[in-house]
Image (cartoon, rainbow, N blue to C red):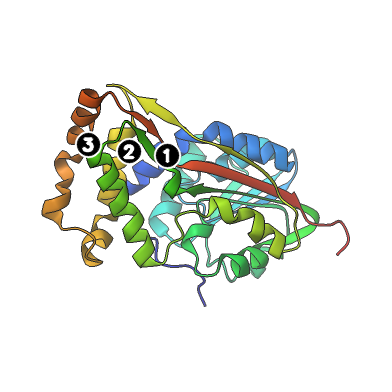
């Protein structure tokens, strides 16, 4: 039985490249959360919904050669990319397995369970989180990062940017994806008997060299099959091949400042004796 919805953005080569770019935006924050959660040398770590492997590779650097990181995902394309990237980085302590998040018992127990942008894609995040933390050894750490999509803002108002973000939000809503999972992490940890410590950051950009134009357009591109299938917008309305340039030109005329979604990190330790 799967607790996951189909990943609405798909696993095309462009989507996998978008995930790598997204990971670069939040690499420092991810490392901070993992460190504050207590990841260190020799630990055995599970990265759930590992995608192309960025969180798993960061965890692998922290646990070192004496540790082990297992990345679990359902996408063969993502796992293939993760294995290749880890090999290129010399991170032999990271391995990647095709697994459903509801059936991880064969992997054994872990010193830490981590995940980024995964709970928003599951149908019952509280149940899934509890299942994942059941894989923790006593005293083990859980560390998760999620976003609050509705926190996105542009100043002054940008009609095209607002419209494009609206397509993403509405497609997520109709697909059963929770757009503000970051704000719900405290209650999810609490329901599993864990008291979370939390931090949040957001990325801010503007000007001709901002990466937001391509990032927005590639997110919409990956989601376009769902946007059209769910009658959120038509391909003609989106006009995907010109979206990035149109957003850039509107921004340069209006001198806009873009606030990316708020990223929320939460971590806690399982009691040493349940």
Q: Is residue 42 left or right of residue 160?
A: right
Which residue matches tag 1? Answer: 22
Judging depth in this view, the residue of 204 and 145 nearest the camera is 204
Residue 176, placed above or below residue 149: below
- Discs 3, 2 touching: Cβ within 8 Å: no
Under circle 1, the secondary element is: helix
Q: Which mark is residue 244?
A: 3
Instruction: Examine the image and state in which quarter residue 66 appears.
Output: top right
Q: Earlier in the sequence, mark 1 or mark 3?
A: 1
Which residue matches tag 2? Answer: 215
Under circle 2, the secondary element is: helix
Instruction: Name the residue: 17% across, 50% down.
Output: 238
Tally of numbered tags = 3
Q: Earlier in the sequence, mark 2 or mark 1?
A: 1
Disc 2 crowd rating (10 Å Cα; few below 14, some 14-19, many 20+) is some
**Mark 2 → mark 1, Cα distance in angstroms:** 8 Å
């Amino acid at each position: 039985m799967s607790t996951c919805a189909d990943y609405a953005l798909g696993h095309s080569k462009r989507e996998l490249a978008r995930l790598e770019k997204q990971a670069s935006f939040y690499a420092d924050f991810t490392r901070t959360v993992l460190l504050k959660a207590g990841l260190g040398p020799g630990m055995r770590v599970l990265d759930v919904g590992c995608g192309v492997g960025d969180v798993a590779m960061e965890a692998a650097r922290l646990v070192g050669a004496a540790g082990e990181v297992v990345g679990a995902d359902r996408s063969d394309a993502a796992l293939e990319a993760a294995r290749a990237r880890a090999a290129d980085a010399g991170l032999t302590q990271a391995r990647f397995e095709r697994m459903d998040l509801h059936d991880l018992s064969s992997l054994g127990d872990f010193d830490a369970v981590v995940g980024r942008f995964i709970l928003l894609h599951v149908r019952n995040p509280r149940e899934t989180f509890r299942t994942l933390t059941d894989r923790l050894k006593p005293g083990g750490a859980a560390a998760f990062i999620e976003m609050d999509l509705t926190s996105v803002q542009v100043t002054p108002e940008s009609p095209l940017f607002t419209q494009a973000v609206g397509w993403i939000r509405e497609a997520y809503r109709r697909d059963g994806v929770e757009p503000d999972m970051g704000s719900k992490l405290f209650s999810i940890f609490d329901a599993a008997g864990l008291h979370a410590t939390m931090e949040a950051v957001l990325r801010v950009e503007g000007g001709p060299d901002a990466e937001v134009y391509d990032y927005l357009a590639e997110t919409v591109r990956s989601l376009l099959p769902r946007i059209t299938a769910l009658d959120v917008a038509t391909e003609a309305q989106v006009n995907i091949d010109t979206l990035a340039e149109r957003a850039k030109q509107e921004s340069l005329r209006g001198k806009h400042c873009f606030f990316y979604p708020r990223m929320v990190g939460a971590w806690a330790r399982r009691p040493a004796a349940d």
